[in-house]
Image: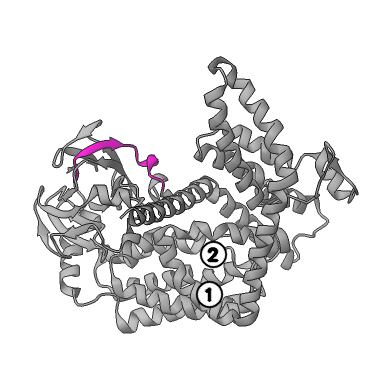
């Protein structure tokens, strides 16, 4: 019996550590993803201007724009040091200072001069260029956060303001140069070599897997664990083979959305598809397509997977590379090389998804019910209403959720609840428009047009339905207070999962404002969210 308990404890610890790692990585990259994408588009614009002969590499204009586009990447250890330290509850500016120390001229001059026999207190130093790197600062700031927790316990409170940064910088910066930096560099290079090895052996197979899986990795939040590899490849080799493979997925989503736009006769669904195409095409942000179409209509998942696999396989087989980080869109096309082959892969994925959607349709066997739901509870006819609480528990801000899709309000505005009772009830009178197969998440469209997404816990999709029991099915009509899902809070926690539950209005853009109607403790069916039109 003891052996079994020990084994269970080990499993719990592994799951908890993995959840924390993914949450930390995603939470660190989320705040700077926008500026990364914007800077990548500047790089794409410069490539266009150079190819047209409107700019030269020697011009002052090019130098200034290039500085604007490359600054975030060159000083990436500084920015990531700030966001990672903040995410870990440490001083963000100390984290930034650790990253800045790796780029300070006294150190970089030694690297540039290829200085020999450099020592720190008699210990040999392995010099390396840390500009644009990811893994060294991830390791260094993670260790700093642990040191900071220790210092908070042993240093007198009134002295912590300057003593903690002093000790942290004196300890962490040398350790980074001596140990963490070289180790992180080797890890990044090893990952890059592994990816290049797989691509060289079968770029087609690697591209097919990545292109098919990327949309679903994004839904699960696991894509954040892959993005650092993109950046590490760019830092070490200047080229990245993975990003062109996964670029096929968002283009496949755009093709599917375009197919829905042409095929549907429902003006509300046509508006939704069209509104998702614009940010996808111009900025590479496909959340509207993902949560408005891909999650709602299961047939589109198969279409996007097939088209993404074909496009990714083409880019992988042809050895297409990314020359900078940019979210895949029409504006970022010049970031990839060779452009012609990249276009074959990505536009091929778009066209295949478009054709499959037009031929096969986007709806399954619930076509008429889905159409009726969108018609009666459509996004264009939203009304002012109050959403009830689907749970009993403690209200917390949405930004406390570790998944950045919710904490940054990418999915929509709303609120989160730390449940004290394992029951989800209907927050409105309406229709169950989405019920995940794992029964951990449910979407409801109210009679007033509000689209409400409730996901019990963080990453609980990995439980594959264990500890969850649904009492309704998709397209059931429900009344406020009806029991929707039961879940076992204690067993979910014991498995290492956070049960904080986001309650989000996914069609937030249809409202003037989405505000909390309550605070503190809340009981199921109490008022939770006010919607203004």
Residue at point 60%, 67% (across, down): 333
Where is residue 335 drawn, in percent x and y?
Answer: 64, 65
Residue at (56% x, 23% y) in the render: 154
Cα–Cα gap, marks 1 and 2? 9 Å
Residue at 37% over, 63% down: 290
Magenta-highlighted residues: 390-402
Determine which of the numbered discs, if any, sits on residue 346 in the image.
Answer: 1
The picture quadrant where one finds residue 43 is bottom right
108 is within the stretch colored magenta: no
Instruction: Say which quarter of the image contains residue 315.
Output: bottom right
Element class at badge 1: helix
Residue 212 % position (x, y): 45, 74
Relative side of 277 to 265, left or right: right
| Residue denoted by label 2 | 328
SS label for mark 2: loop
Name the colouring of the figure: one colour
């Amino acid at each position: 019996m003891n052996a079994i308990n020990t084994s269970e404890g080990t499993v719990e610890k592994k799951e908890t550590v993995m959840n924390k790692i993914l949450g930390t990585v995603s939470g660190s990259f989320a705040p700077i993803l926008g500026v990364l994408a914007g800077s990548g588009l500047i790089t794409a614009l410069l490539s266009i201007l150079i190819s047209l002969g409107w700019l030269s590499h020697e011009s002052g204009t090019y130098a200034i724009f290039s500085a604007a586009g490359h600054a975030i990447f060159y000083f990436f250890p500084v920015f990531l040091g700030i966001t990672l330290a903040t995410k870990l509850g440490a001083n963000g500016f100390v984290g930034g200072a650790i990253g800045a120390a790796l780029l300070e001229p006294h150190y970089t001059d030694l690297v540039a001069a290829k200085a020999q026999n450099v020592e720190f207190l008699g210990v040999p130093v392995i010099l390396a260029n840390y500009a644009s790197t990811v893994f060294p600062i991830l390791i260094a700031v993670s260790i700093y956060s642990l040191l900071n927790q220790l210092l908070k316990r042993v240093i007198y409170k009134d002295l912590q303001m300057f003593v903690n940064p002093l000790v942290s910088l004196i300890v962490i910066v040398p350790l980074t140069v001596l140990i963490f930096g070289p180790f992180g560099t080797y890890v990044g290079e090893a990952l890059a070599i592994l990816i290049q090895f797989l691509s060289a052996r079968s770029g087609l197979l690697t591209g097919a897997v990545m292109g098919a899986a990327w949309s679903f990795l994004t839904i699960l939040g696991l894509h954040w664990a892959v993005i650092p590899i993109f950046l590490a490849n760019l830092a070490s080799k200047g080229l990245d083979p993975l990003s062109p493979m996964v670029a096929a997925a968002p283009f496949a989503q755009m093709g599917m959305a375009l197919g829905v736009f042409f095929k549907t006769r429902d003006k509300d669904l046509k508006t939704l598809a069209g509104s998702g195409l614009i940010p996808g095409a111009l900025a590479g942000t496909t959340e509207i397509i993902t949560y408005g179409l891909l999650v709602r209509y299961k047939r589109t998942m198969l279409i996007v997977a097939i088209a993404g696999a074909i496009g990714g396989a083409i880019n992988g087989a042809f050895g297409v590379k990314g020359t900078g980080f940019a979210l895949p869109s029409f504006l970022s096309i010049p970031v990839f090389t060779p452009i012609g082959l990249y276009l074959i892969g990505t536009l091929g994925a778009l066209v295949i998804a478009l054709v499959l959607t037009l031929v096969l349709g986007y709806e399954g066997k619930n076509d008429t019910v889905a159409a009726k739901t969108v018609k009666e509870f459509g996004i264009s006819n939203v009304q002012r209403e109050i959403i009830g609480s689907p749970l009993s528990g403690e209200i917390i801000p949405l930004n406390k959720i570790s998944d950045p899709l919710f904490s940054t309000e990418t999915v929509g505005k709303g609120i989160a609840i730390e449940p004290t009772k394992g029951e989800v009830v209907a927050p409105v009178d309406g229709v169950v428009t989405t019920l995940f197969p794992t029964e951990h998440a449910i979407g409801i469209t109210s009679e007033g047009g509000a689209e409400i997404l409730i996901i019990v816990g963080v990453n609980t999709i990995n439980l594959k339905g264990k500890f969850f029991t649904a009492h309704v099915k998709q397209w059931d009509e429900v009344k406020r207070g009806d029991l929707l899902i039961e879940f076992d809070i204690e067993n979910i926690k014991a498995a290492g999962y956070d049960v904080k539950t986001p309650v989000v209005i996914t069609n937030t853009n249809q409202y003037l404002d989405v505000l909390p109607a309550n605070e503190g403790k809340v009981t199921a069916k109490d008022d939770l969210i006010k919607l203004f039109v």
